[in-house]
Every structure is written in C-alpha cells, then in structure tokens.
Amino acid sequence: GSAAADDGALTTPPRYWRNGKRRVAVATSIIEGKTPVDVTPKLLRQLEGYVDSAAAIAESVRRHMSASPLFDVDLLAMVMPRPHLLPYERKLRAFGFDVVHVDYPLQWADIADGYYRDKLNSSGCCGMSELAKLHAFTLEDYYRVVLLDSDAMVVRNFDRVLDARDDIGLVYTNGTMEGEIFQGGMWIARPNRTVYDGMLDLVRRGAFYPGSAWERSGVGWLYGGATIQGLLPYWFQVVEPPHRSWRVSRCVYNYQDAADCVHVPLRDVHLMHFTLCPKPFACIILEHKDRCMHFHELWWQYTRAVEERLHLRPRKACGRGAHGPYVHIDLNNKLPIDDGAGSRT
C-alpha cells in the first residue's frame, strides 16, 4: 500500500521481458490429425515434407525477425508425443526449434455432449488434435505467440502486428472459403491462462450445436468450426468484447494467392501460407502462376540456407514440369570436412 511498494511493483519487469525486449515465440505444430491414425508410408512422406517446411519458418524468422528492436524471438515446435512423430524432433532441433510436447488438452470422455464429440473428430483438417494448439495461451513467459502452420513462412518483418495493444488477445485473418471468419494457419495469441481455461470449459461442456455452433450463437458454423477455427472467433467476438481481437489483412499477413489478393504487391506480403499455391514439397510446378513460383523459389532459398548452415549436401530440387518425388533434408548427408591440408574426411 505504500508509495515505495507501488513504485517497486511498477519497476518489476514482466516475466516476458528479456534482453530489454518483449519475448515472443514463433511456433509451429506437428500433430497427429484425425483419429485413429493410419501410419502409412504415404503419411510419413507427407510428414517429412511438413517438417522440412519448418526449416523455411526457422530461416525466415532469422532473416526478418532476429534484428527486431522490439522483440526477442524464440522458435517453438509443438509436437504430439506419438511414436511416429518423435523421430522428427532431432530435425526440428537442428533447424533451431525448441521442442515442446503438447497433447489433447482433455480426453474424449471429459466431453459431456455426444453430438459434439462426433463432430469434433471429423472437423477441419485434424479433428481434436487442433485443440493442442490452444497450449499457446498457457505460455505466459511470452508476450505473444505466433502460430504458423508448417507450410507457412515469414516474408517480411511483422513487428507492427506484434506491437498491438496489450489488451488484444488475438490477431488473426479470415480465410479464402465463403464464411471462413478465421483461418487457422496464422494467428497470434496473447497468452492468458484464464482464457485457456474458459475455452476448455466450453469444449468440456460440448457447447456446440447443429446449425448454430458455439452456445447457439451462430459463430463457428464453418470448416473446422468445432475446433479452433470456430472456438477462437466465438471466444474473441462473443465472450470477450470485440476490441480484444484484431483482424488483419489476409492478403498481407496470410497470403494464399486468392483472387482477391492479386492486386497486393509482393513487396507488401509479410507472411505466406501455401494453401492455394501447391506446397513446395509436393513438387507440383505451376509455371503459369507467377506468384506461386516466386514464393516457391523463396522457400527453396530458405531451406537451402538451412542445409548450408548445417553443412549438408544440397538435396535435389523439384524439376520444372515434374511432379516429384520430393527429396527430404537428410541430417546424415554431411558435406566432407576440409582438414586444411587439402584432404577431405
């Protein structure tokens, strides 16, 4: 109650303060998808591509965010501890990520409503696994946590949106599909354990209804609406006052080559997400799509830089007009070391 105590409280830096800057995490996730998971060679090849694509995130963050005057940035990989996913942790760490194990925030039996349980497992790309991304809201050692799908990458510094007002709990974009009010491939959370607990309570109660979505509000009846793509907009548009969230331009901060974004100069794109453009590791070359080709080439620049930094032999690139197969980054394919006497070992 004394003035001295008040002054002391004001000068105590927040827990997210580090090196004179606010600490931010750029996170991607490797999750298992809809259950039950059929671990096939095809699935493992796809996972190799997504994990390699995380290298583009790591390199792009180093190039565009490491010199930020405002933020000290960490790389996080949120990985579900499953036998078929754990082998990828070595590669993610080599790319520069700290690996954090995340899992379902609750069990199927914890969900009260049978309709919602069934809807949840079939919702969106990944069913209940998507809820593991809510872990971002528990990371209160960070000022903000940027969630990027691993098929996204940074193209330019985006301090402007990270420096949003302190009370903004969610920065997001809409999607390219009709009615897609929230796109889950790029969003920024202000960690808050109370928000996390509140959203889990909605899930636990199964408060998602046919045709009317969360708490019969009409918010969240869309692709992935039973998971984060409906839950987050419901929370931040209905439970929280609307000024606690900020929708930014999809054409700038979640570029996907949609028709309504072709007017945006490439120099204005800050974050790229390979959805409408084929994923570079799919080895589908669309030479008539100049913008997709531009970002494919940038992805290869980023991932090649990671290979070079790790002293790896450069892998074979996808050929023009080719449709695969993609050659993944191999941590064991080291370049020979020159011992200085002209010999290589």
Image: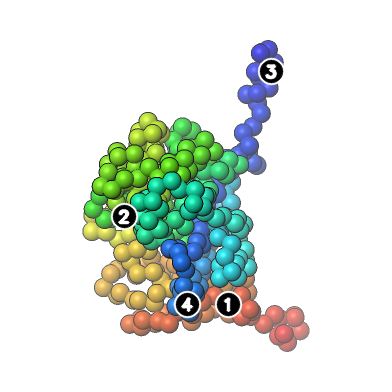
Q: Nearer the viewer, residue 145 or 196?
A: 196
Please report the residue visible at 58 percent of the width from the left and 77 percent of the height from the top: 330
Which one is in front in this view, the residue at disc 2 or the one at disc 3?
2
| Separation (CA) of disc 2 from disc 3 | 51 Å
**Residue contact between numbered discs 1 and 2, judged by CB atoms under 8 Å:** no
Which disc number belongs to residue 330? 1
User: Callout 1: helix, strand or loop?
Assistant: loop
Between discs 1 and 3, the one toward the N terminus = 3
| Separation (CA) of disc 4 from disc 2 | 26 Å
Please report the residue visible at 43 percent of the width from the left and 46 percent of the height from the top: 112
x%, y% of residue 130?
45, 55
Q: Which residue is mark 4?
A: 40
Between discs 4 and 2, the one toward the N terminus = 4
Relative horizontal placement of residue 74, taking residue 343 as reference (left or right) = left
Task: State the residue lying farthest toward the top.
Answer: 2
Which disc number belongs to residue 223? 2
Identify which amino acid the numbered label 1 is placed on: Asp
Please report the residue visible at 33 percent of the width from the left and 66 percent of the height from the top: 277
| Separation (CA) of disc 1 from disc 3 | 56 Å
**Vertical placement of 122 versus 91: above or below?**
above
Q: Quadrant of residue 214?
A: top left
User: Callout 3: helix, strand or loop?
Assistant: helix
Identify which amino acid the numbered label 4 is placed on: Thr
Between discs 3 and 4, the one toward the N terminus = 3
Which disc number belongs to residue 276? none
Identify which amino acid the numbered label 2 is placed on: Tyr
| Separation (CA) of disc 1 from disc 4 | 20 Å
